[in-house]
Image (tube, helix red, strand yellow):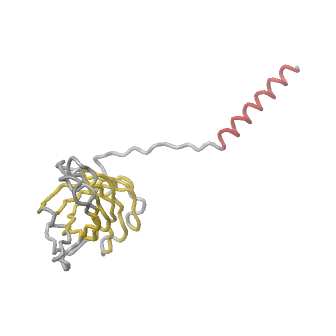
């Protein structure tokens, strides 16, 4: 009889221990994403006109730091920008948003920049922001940067912004097509 009581007590203690253990454990599961089915998809153009001393009215960016003598690939150059985002290639088209942020050249042996910026939407279609950051390997035909968050219509959004250089006119002007796919909306 005593061994039966001991077995039941041991069984009850073990059950109590499991209950306490699992009551403080958080179960998590990783959400899987289908790369072919984003929840939102946008394509638009980013325009950048670098200030050169004579184009105050049209400039959308300015080099804050540009150290000389660090190689042929603009290494160390730091640029801030506030440029229009348009639905088409025309710089003078109605802006859908503004791209506000910075980039800097971070490679001595090739052209490579690191971008960190916010797309600020304030239109009848969308209100809010998307935050984008990552390496722009300029010599590659397409480059993926991370969408790391957002506000408003894009609250806590995550996804990928694919860059394709549409036109490059030296240090004066470039236009990049951005294909933004959001997988967490």
- Measuring from the top left, give residue 173's x and y in whole percent: 15, 66
Q: Is residue 172 left or right of residue 150?
A: left
- Measuring from the top left, give residue 109's x and y in whole percent: 21, 46
Q: Is residue 185 visible?
A: no
Residue situated in front as seen by the camera: 168 or 7 = 168
Q: Is residue 49 left or right of residue 80?
A: left
Residue situated in front as seen by the camera: 61 or 94 = 61
Residue 13: quadrant of the picture: top right
Image vertical order of residue 75 relative to residue 92, above or below = above
Image vertical order of residue 124 relative to residue 144, above or below = below
- Measuring from the top left, give residue 23's x and y in whole percent: 66, 43
Residue at horizontal 35%, vertical 71%? 127
Residue at horizontal 18%, vertical 72%? 52
Residue situated in front as seen by the camera: 83 or 107 = 107
Image vertical order of residue 117 relative to residue 72, above or below = below
Residue 97: quadrant of the picture: bottom left
Residue at horizontal 29%, vertical 62%? 78
- Measuring from the top left, give residue 95's x and y in whole percent: 23, 73
Count of labels shown? 0
Query: Which residue is at the far front?
Result: 69
Residue at horizontal 40%, vertical 44%? 32
Q: Is residue 29 visible?
A: yes
What quarter of the picture does the N terminus occupy? Answer: top right
What quarter of the picture does the C terminus occupy? Answer: bottom left
Residue 100: quadrant of the picture: bottom left
Query: Which residue is at the far bottom?
Result: 57
Query: Which residue is at the far right?
Result: 2
């Amino acid at each position: 009889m005593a061994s039966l009581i001991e077995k039941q007590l041991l069984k009850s203690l073990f059950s109590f221990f499991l209950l306490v253990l699992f009551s403080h454990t958080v179960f998590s599961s990783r959400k899987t994403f289908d790369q072919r089915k984003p929840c939102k998809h946008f394509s638009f153009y980013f325009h950048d006109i670098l200030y050169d001393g004579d184009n105050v009215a049209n400039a959308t960016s300015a080099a804050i730091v540009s150290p000389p003598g660090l190689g042929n690939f603009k290494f160390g150059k730091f640029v801030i920008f506030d440029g229009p985002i348009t639905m088409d290639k025309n710089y003078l088209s109605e802006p859908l948003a503004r791209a506000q942020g910075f980039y800097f050249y971070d490679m001595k042996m090739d052209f490579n920049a690191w971008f960190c910026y916010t797309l600020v939407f304030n239109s009848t279609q969308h209100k809010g922001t998307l935050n984008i950051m990552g390496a722009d390997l300029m010599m590659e035909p397409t480059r993926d940067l991370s969408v790391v968050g957002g506000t408003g219509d894009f609250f806590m959004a995550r996804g990928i912004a694919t860059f394709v250089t549409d036109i490059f006119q030296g240090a004066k002007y470039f236009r990049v097509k951005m294909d933004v796919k959001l997988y967490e909306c």
